Image (tube, rainbow, N blue to C red):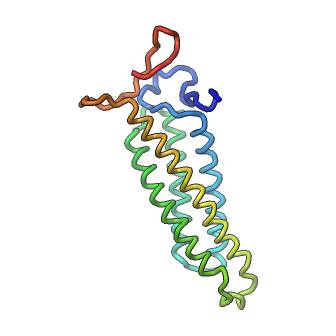
Amino acid sequence: MPALTTDIHAYGGRATHSHIPAQPLWVGILRIVQAVLALITLALSAYALSYFGGYSGYGLNIFTSLLTWIFLGYIFVTAFLFPEAYSVWAQLGLEIALVIFWLSTWAVIASLAAAFGDWYGYRYYGNSSAAVGCTKAAAALGAFVWVSFVATLINLGKSCMSCFQPFSSLPCKFVWRRESRGGEGRR
């Protein structure tokens, strides 16, 4: 599967993308999955919030979903449209923040789902099974988003650390060069 390991930024030359760490194609696919799942969890939490009222877990899920969309927008714009504005440190910091937020989000939503799961106190409000189901689905999908952000954080960390030279005081500049064999490689 060499197609899944090719650099997604390697189109049209890397003259303006030399400071952006190489990312395989599966990371791009995972970013799309993260965006779709964040949108779905946003919708599920919004429905459950409209039904049950002001539980803080729903608000946290909405915030984390919106932060995910802002982060993915930043990655798309800076990696493909405006590479001069890209900062690997900003991406690393936001990835770490999103790993923490998604862990907190799906844990809080899962605790709400467990509390609502067999509790019949909400039956007098009408059909609460749909809202409880939305809460459970948001918790499950939130766990998948968290795992996907852990995977992309590990990949970014590996990409950043692979170019640091031992005992070097200079940071990695993600410089690409042509090897004598005709392939591309990192320096």
Q: Residue at x 43, y 22 (%)?
A: 186
Quadrant of the rendering where the C terminus is positioned = top left
Q: Residue at x 66, y 59 (%)?
A: 40
- Looking at the image, residue 172 sits to the left or right of residue 48; the answer is left
Residue 107 in picture, x, y percent from top left: 52, 68
Q: Residue furthest top?
A: 180
The total of numbered circles placed on residues is 0
The residue closer to the viewer here, 58 or 118, is 118
Which image quarter: residue 20?
Answer: top left
Residue 89 in picture, x, y percent from top left: 37, 42
In the image, is residue 86 above or below residue 124? Answer: above
Quadrant of the rendering where the N terminus is positioned = top right
In the image, is residue 8 above or below residue 157? Answer: above
In the image, is residue 21 above or below residue 67? Answer: above
Q: Residue at x 50, y 49 (%)?
A: 71
Q: Residue at x 63, y 60 (%)?
A: 141
Q: Residue furthest right?
A: 127
Which image quarter: residue 90?
Answer: top left
Residue 3 in picture, x, y percent from top left: 64, 28
The residue closer to the viewer here, 67 or 116, is 116
- Looking at the image, residue 124 sits to the left or right of residue 67; the answer is right
Residue 150 in picture, x, y percent from top left: 50, 50
